[in-house]
Image (cartoon, helix red, strand yellow):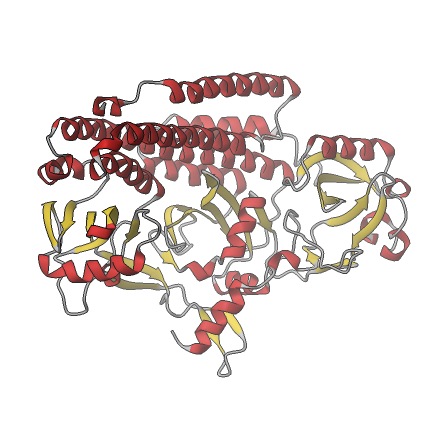
C-alpha cells in the first residue's frame, strides 16, 4: 500500500459523517428543549414551511409555529421512546400557513427533541404500512427454505414496492468487504450480482450509522446540503445528527453514486445478533422520492428480513453446538474411564476433530504431533510453534485464518491455512491444534480492490473510483474464519480437557469449576438470545395498541421461559459428572 493510499484510507475512515451540520433539502428540522419547547436549532430552509425566518424562530417556543394537538402527539411519542433511540413516526399533520401536509418523526438525544418534517403528497400514505409489509412478508415466507431463493424474493418484493431500477442484497463478509448476493433490476441496468466491494467502500463509521438508521433515503444525489442553524450545541460541540433520517451524507458518497450513474438511492439495514449483516440497497437512474408510508412498510419488511436472517444463524449455531456437545460428552466419558486421560487423548483425535468444525486436528507434544484428518506436514511444526509463542494470551484459545501467519515463507502447508490452538499445558509445550483448508476463491471485484480512491499527486484529495467493471482475482492462503461459535466450542472443549491435564488429586475441585464455567456459558447464551430478541422487537413502532398489548404479553412469557431455562442450567446434572 502506497503512503498516499494509506493517508486516503485513514482520512475516509476518520470522516465525522454524523457531524455534517446539514440536512437534505427534501425536509425540515426543528430541535427543541423541554419543557418549554424552546427552539434551539432549525434548518436554513424552515421559512418555506413555517413562513418564519430561522432567526425569528430560534429561542422562541414551538407553540408559536405548530398547533397544540401536533405538539401533544410529538410529546407522547417522545415519552414512549428511550433517549438515543431511532426516530419514530409521530404524526401526519398540516403545518405552516399553507397547511402543508407533512410526515413528522421525532427522537430525543442529548437533552434535545429533534423534529424532522417531510412534506407528503396527498394520497401517498393511503395504504397502511403494516398491511403492505404483511403482504410482502407473506410472499417471501411462503417459498422454499433455500437461502438464495429467499434473498431473491426479498429484492423482488422491495423493487415492486419502491419502483427502483435496481435492488440488491449486499452482504458484509468477515473482513468487512461486501458482496452482492441477490439482485432484481431493470434489464437496461448493468448487473452487479456476484461482485465484491472492498471494506473502504462502506467504512466503519458508516456501518455504525446503518445500525442507528435502519432505513436511509437519498431522493436526489445531486442535492445541495441545507445547513442546520446553529450547527453547534450550546456547549460549542458539533450537533450530533446520527439518528436523523434527513442527515446530509458524505460528499464522497454522493460522488461515488454519481460515478455509478445513480441519481437516487435507498438502503434498508439487515441486522442480526446486534451486528450489521448487510443491506438491501436500492439504486435509481433518476431523482426518486419515496413516500414516508412506503418507507415505513420497507422498514417493517426489513425488520422481518433481519429476524429471518438472525433466526437462521441461531438455528445453525444451535445445531452445530448440539452436535459438538454430544461429542464432548462422549469424549469426556472415554477419557474419564482411561487410566490416564492425558495418554488416552492421542488415541481419540478423530473424535476430538468433531468437537469444532475443522478439517483436521493435531496434538502437539514435545515438538512432535499426532494427527487426524487434513493437517500440514511435520515440517511446519517450527512455524506453528513460533506463531504460538507470539500469539498466546492468558491460556485462551488463539486462532488465525491466514497461512502466512504461521507458515515459513518457503514451506508448503499442503493446502492448510486456518489454525485454532487450544493450550493444554503451554509450559510443557502441549497444544491441541485444529486446522482448516484454504478457500481458493476466484473473486470478481467491482474494480481493482487496491484502487478504492482517485488520489491527487500530493495525496491530499480523495475521491471514489470511477470504474466498477468486474476485476478478477484469485485469492489463496486463507480459510473460512473461525467465528464466535467455533471459538465458544473450542473454549468448552478446553474446559473438558483441562481436567485430564491436572493433578488427579484435584479432580473434585476441577469438576466443580467446570460445572460453574459451563453454567456461566449457558447463561451467557440464553442472555444473548433474549438480547437479540429485544433488539428486533424494540423497533416495532408501527403496530396498533392492541398488537402492542399482545406483543407485551408474548415477550413476558418468553422472558419467563428463558428465566426458567437459565435457572435450570445451573441445577441440571452435568454430563461431566461421569468424571466423579
Q: Is residue 109 above or below residue 333?
A: below
Q: Residue furthest front?
A: 505
In the rendered image, which quarter is residue 64 located in? Answer: top right
Q: In the rendering, at what x and y percent does residue 138 appear?
A: 45, 25
Residue 191 appears in the picture as rendered: no
Left or right of 479? Residue 173 is right
Q: Quadrant of the N terminus?
A: bottom left
Q: Is residue 443 above or below residue 464?
A: above
**Residue at image coords 66%, 48%:** 244
**Residue at image coords 59%, 64%:** 251
Left or right of 129? Residue 42 is right
Q: Quadrant of the C terminus?
A: top left
In the rendered image, which quarter is residue 322 located in? Answer: top left
Left or right of 530? Residue 243 is right
| Nearer to me, 470 or 306 | 306
Q: In the rendering, at what x and y percent does residue 418 appear?
A: 23, 52
Residue 572 appears in the picture as rendered: yes
Amino acid at each position: 500500500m502506497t503512503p498516499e493510499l494509506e493517508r486516503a484510507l485513514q482520512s475516509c475512515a476518520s470522516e465525522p459523517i454524523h457531524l455534517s451540520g446539514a440536512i437534505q433539502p427534501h425536509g425540515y428540522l426543528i430541535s427543541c428543549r423541554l419543557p418549554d419547547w424552546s427552539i434551539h436549532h432549525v434548518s436554513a430552509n424552515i421559512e418555506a414551511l413555517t413562513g418564519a425566518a430561522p432567526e425569528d424562530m430560534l429561542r422562541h417556543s414551538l407553540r408559536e409555529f405548530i398547533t397544540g394537538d401536533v405538539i401533544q402527539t410529538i410529546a407522547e411519542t417522545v415519552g414512549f421512546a428511550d433517549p438515543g433511540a431511532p426516530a419514530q413516526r409521530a404524526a401526519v399533520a398540516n403545518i405552516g400557513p399553507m397547511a402543508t401536509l407533512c410526515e413528522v418523526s421525532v427522537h430525543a438525544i442529548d437533552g434535545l427533541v429533534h423534529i424532522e418534517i417531510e412534506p407528503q403528497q396527498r394520497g401517498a400514505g393511503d395504504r397502511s404500512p403494516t398491511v403492505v409489509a404483511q403482504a410482502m412478508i407473506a410472499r417471501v415466507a411462503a417459498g422454499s427454505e433455500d437461502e438464495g431463493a429467499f434473498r431473491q424474493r426479498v429484492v423482488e418484493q422491495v423493487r415492486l414496492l419502491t419502483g427502483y431500477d435496481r435492488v440488491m442484497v449486499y452482504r458484509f463478509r468477515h473482513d468487512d468487504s461486501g458482496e452482492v448476493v441477490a439482485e432484481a433490476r431493470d434489464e437496461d441496468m448493468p448487473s452487479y450480482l456476484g461482485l465484491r466491494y472492498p471494506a473502504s467502500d462502506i467504512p466503519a463509521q458508516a456501518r455504525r450509522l446503518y445500525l442507528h438508521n435502519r432505513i436511509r433515503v437519498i431522493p436526489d444525489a445531486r442535492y445541495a446540503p441545507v445547513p442546520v442553524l446553529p450547527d453547534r450545541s450550546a456547549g460549542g460541540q458539533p450537533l450530533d445528527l446520527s439518528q436523523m433520517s434527513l442527515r446530509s451524507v458524505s460528499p464522497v458518497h454522493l460522488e461515488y453514486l454519481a460515478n455509478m450513474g445513480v441519481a437516487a438511492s435507498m438502503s434498508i439495514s439487515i441486522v442480526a445478533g446486534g451486528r450489521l449483516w448487510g443491506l438491501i440497497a436500492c439504486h435509481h437512474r433518476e431523482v426518486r422520492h419515496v413516500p414516508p408510508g412506503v418507507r415505513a412498510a420497507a422498514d417493517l419488511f426489513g425488520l422481518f428480513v433481519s429476524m429471518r436472517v438472525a433466526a437462521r444463524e441461531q438455528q445453525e449455531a444451535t445445531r452445530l453446538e448440539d452436535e459438538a456437545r454430544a461429542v464432548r460428552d462422549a469424549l469426556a466419558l472415554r477419557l474419564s474411564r482411561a487410566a490416564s486421560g492425558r495418554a488416552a487423548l492421542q488415541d481419540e483425535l478423530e473424535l476430538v476433530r468433531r468437537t469444532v468444525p475443522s478439517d483436521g486436528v493435531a496434538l502437539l507434544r514435545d515438538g512432535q504431533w499426532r494427527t487426524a484428518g487434513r493437517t500440514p506436514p511435520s515440517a511446519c511444526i517450527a512455524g506453528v510453534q513460533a506463531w504460538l509463542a507470539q500469539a498466546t494470551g492468558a491460556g485462551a484459545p488463539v486462532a488465525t485464518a491466514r497461512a502466512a501467519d504461521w507458515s515459513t515463507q518457503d514451506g508448503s502447508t499442503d493446502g492448510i491455512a486456518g489454525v485454532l490452538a487450544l493450550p493444554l499445558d503451554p509450559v510443557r509445550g502441549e497444544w491441541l491444534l485444529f486446522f482448516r483448508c484454504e478457500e481458493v476463491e476466484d473473486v470478481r471485484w467491482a474494480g481493482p480492490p487496491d484502487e478504492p480512491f482517485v488520489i491527487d499527486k500530493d495525496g491530499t484529495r480523495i475521491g471514489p473510483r470511477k470504474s466498477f467493471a468486474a476485476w478478477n482475482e484469485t485469492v489463496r492462503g486463507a480459510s473460512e474464519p473461525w467465528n464466535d461459535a467455533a471459538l465458544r466450542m473450542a473454549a468448552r472443549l478446553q474446559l473438558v480437557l483441562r481436567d485430564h491435564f491436572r493433578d488427579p488429586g484435584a479432580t473434585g475441585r476441577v469438576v466443580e469449576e467446570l460445572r460453574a464455567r459451563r453454567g456461566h456459558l449457558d447463561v451467557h447464551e440464553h442472555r444473548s438470545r433474549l438480547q437479540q430478541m429485544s433488539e428486533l422487537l424494540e423497533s416495532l413502532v408501527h403496530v396498533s395498541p392492541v398488537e402492542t398489548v399482545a406483543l407485551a404479553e408474548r415477550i413476558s412469557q418468553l422472558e419467563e421461559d428463558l428465566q426458567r431455562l437459565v435457572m435450570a442450567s445451573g441445577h441440571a446434572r452435568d454430563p461431566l459428572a461421569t468424571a466423579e
